[in-house]
Every structure is written in C-alpha cells, then in structure tokens.
Image (cartoon, grey):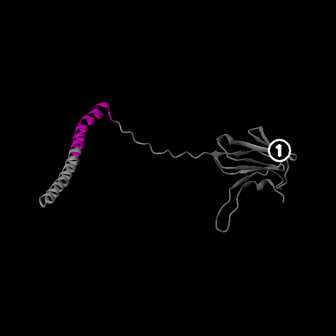
Amino acid sequence: MSLITSDSGVYWCESGSGEHSNAVNITVPAGAVILESPALPVTGGDSVTLRCRYQGTSSNLTADFYKDGSLIRTETTGEMTIPAVSKSDEGLYKCTNSEGESPESRMTVTVPTPIPSPAVPVLSMSLPRLLCSLLVGSPYLLVTIILLVKYCRSRAQVTLFIRTSWWVEKDALFSSGE
C-alpha cells in the first residue's frame, strides 16, 4: 500500500449498525514518516496512543517522540501511549525514526468541567434570637415533662391502691369466716 499527500485527513471506521470508532488524523507528508494521532480533541483522563509509521506500514521501527520540539520518549515499538491525558499533554507532536521525520500534529485535550454539588443551605440565626427561642420554648417543655411525670406517678398509685384494697378485703373475708 502506498500513500500520497492527498491521502491526509481524518479517518474512522463505521459498522453496519452505524457505530463509529474514534477518529484519527493522518498526515501524509511529502516524506515517508507519518505520525498517527487523534483527530479530535481528546478528553482528559482518556488513554491516547501515538503511532510513528513508515509509508503506512505497521513495521515496529524504534521512534523518538517529540512534544513542542522537545524529545519526550523513545519507543522501540514505534508507539507511545499516554495512559491518562491531561491539559499539560496538549501541544504539537512529531516523531522521527530511521527513515525520517513526520510533520507536526496538534493534540488538544478537553477537560470536562465538574458539575458543582448543590450547596447546603446554612440557617442563619442571631444569638439574641436563639436565646429568645430557648427562653420561650424551655418553660413549655419543662411544664410538659413535669405533667407527664405526675400523670405516670398518679396512675401507679391508683394501681397500687386497687391491689392493696383487694388484698385487705380478701383477708377480711377469710378472717370473718373463722
């Protein structure tokens, strides 16, 4: 397979059901070395593989990868993978191998903006208002508790009185019969 400069462009695969693969930007220079890189902006956190090809073949030539003109890595397979891209990975990339140098290709990284969680409303109450609420509410609460305790005690005394009376009457019945 031989490539010519006009073969440069964005390529992707499409299935019969309409599903698309990731698009790649392939630049065929006048020379024979090509850097295969993502065509569209990549999303932060995604894995990206750059491939340095010679005349479209998948030969595993050792390649040097450059970003913004500085050597960043040498790969014996001709492929460089960035496991989780970030905004700092944006820039102009190129590669060189024993056959020559590729033209530069720009990689753009988009970082999705996080959706802020809704803020928890903070109730603002002044100290005087808080004290006033406590002073007004406390007597009602205290009176309610006292009445509840008195009610429970009175029920207990009634029950005790009924039980005691029954035993007294029972003893009186047995003693009068002798």
Q: Quadrant of the C terminus?
A: bottom left
Q: Is residue 31 magenta?
A: no
Q: Which of the 4 image quarters holds residue 66? A: top right
Range of residues picked out in magenta: 125-148
Residue 26 left/right relative to 135 = right
Whether residue 29 is visible here, answered yes or no, is no
Closer to the camera in the image, 159 or 32: 159
Looking at the magenta stretch, what is its main secondary structure?
helix
Residue 168 left/right relative to 104 = left
Q: Which of the 4 image quarters holds residue 2? A: bottom right
| Residue 165: percent from left, percent from top | 16, 54
Task: Say how many tags the image has.
Answer: 1
**The residue tagged with tag 1: helix, strand or loop?**
strand
Q: Which residue was labeled with disc 1?
A: 96
| Residue 132: percent from left, percent from top | 26, 34
Residue 151 left/right relative to 95 = left
Give the amino acid at mark 1. Thr
Closer to the camera in the image, 9 or 126: 126
- What residue is at 77 percent from the left and 56 percent from the top? 7
Above or below, 19 against 155 in this view is: below
